[in-house]
Image (cartoon, helix red, strand yellow):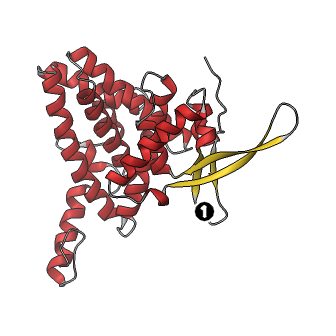
Amino acid sequence: MTEHPTAASGSPFEAIRHATPDGWEYWSARDLLTILDYDSWQKFRKVVDRAELACLNSGENPTDHFIQTDKMVRLGSGATRRIADVHLSRYACYLVIQNADPAKEIVALGQTYFAVQTRRAEQADELAGLTEAQRRIYTRYQLADHNDALADTARAAGVISPTDFAVFQNAGYRALYNGESAADIHQRKGLDSKQHILDHMGSEELGANVFRATQAEAKIRREAIQGAAAATAVHAEVGRKVRGYIADLGGTMPEDLPTPAQSIQELEQAEQKRHRQGPQLGMFDDAT
């Protein structure tokens, strides 16, 4: 197995990330070629070309994400030679990984890394103008939708009985929360029997669960997983990877995040009261 460089975070993809003085982050296609175990630039260039086409088809301008450049390399004789390279944005890397050889284990790792990176950036843009209370409400509704989709996909895969579904759901929680089940989380938060754990999470904790739910649902559906045991194993795998990524970033583990003083319901009541007291737009109002 090829050994790959790793950053302090533990990710080989983080180890090859570059940043310009003005803060633009990029990855060298030549570096990525090595990490992904491609043996020639010609083969890998075809992957990059497919990714550029996918970028164009998505409505993005490829020149914003794929910067054609070159670099000097030292040959065995001691001489130097100029070779072609491409500087890739985070989104470009995500597309390259999606078009790389899925049989490579490192490609699967890269798919997780850049999917999380891309989604985190999207969420940061979406939520930048919201208060923490508004982020919580917004993300809680997101999670409700994604949990419904996950439940539907799990049922289609064969998670039918209430017992099987409880095991399936707890597999994701246990993997993400270092062994804690939903009941354990409920108890740790000091909630009563009528209170739901998701209504007593901050936006960061809710976001981790959104990613767990979306990626588990997508993997079960994409790989046509069948059987309660197999679907449960996928949910656990995704939970572990999300937790691992949080660790790679140096983030706070979900079980260590504080429980907010107010529930989602209390925040919604406060929002409704604010709306009644003035004509200002709420976070979900349409300004057009």
Say which residue appears at 27% left-offset and 34% top-offset: 218
Specify whether residue 256 is in view: no
| Residue 163 image point, x, y percent | 16, 19
1 lies left or right of 230: right
Residue at image location 48% in from the left, 23% down from the top: 104
Q: Nearer the viewer, residue 199 or 67?
A: 67
Label 1: how many Cα within 10 Å (few below 14, some 14–19, many 20+):
few
Q: Is residue 189 above or below residue 34?
A: below
Q: Is residue 191 above or below residue 120?
A: above
Q: Residue at x 22, y 69 (%)?
A: 270
- Say which amino acid is labelled 1: Gly
- State which quadrant residue 193 falls in: top left
Q: Percent from the top left, x then y, of residue 92?
A: 47, 48
Q: Position of residue 125 (x, y in %)?
A: 39, 62
Q: Quadrant of residue 276?
A: bottom left
Label 1 sits on a secondary structure element that is loop
Q: Residue furthest right?
A: 78
Instruction: Give the residue number, with chain letter if any, for mark 1.
Output: 23
Q: Which quadrant does the C terminus fall into?
A: bottom left
From the top left corner, tell me how far across and down residue 207 is, in percent.
36, 48
Q: Is residue 254 left or right of residue 57?
A: right
Eyeballing the image, is 281 above or below 149? below
Query: Which residue does the image show at 23% across and 29% down from the upper left?
Result: 221
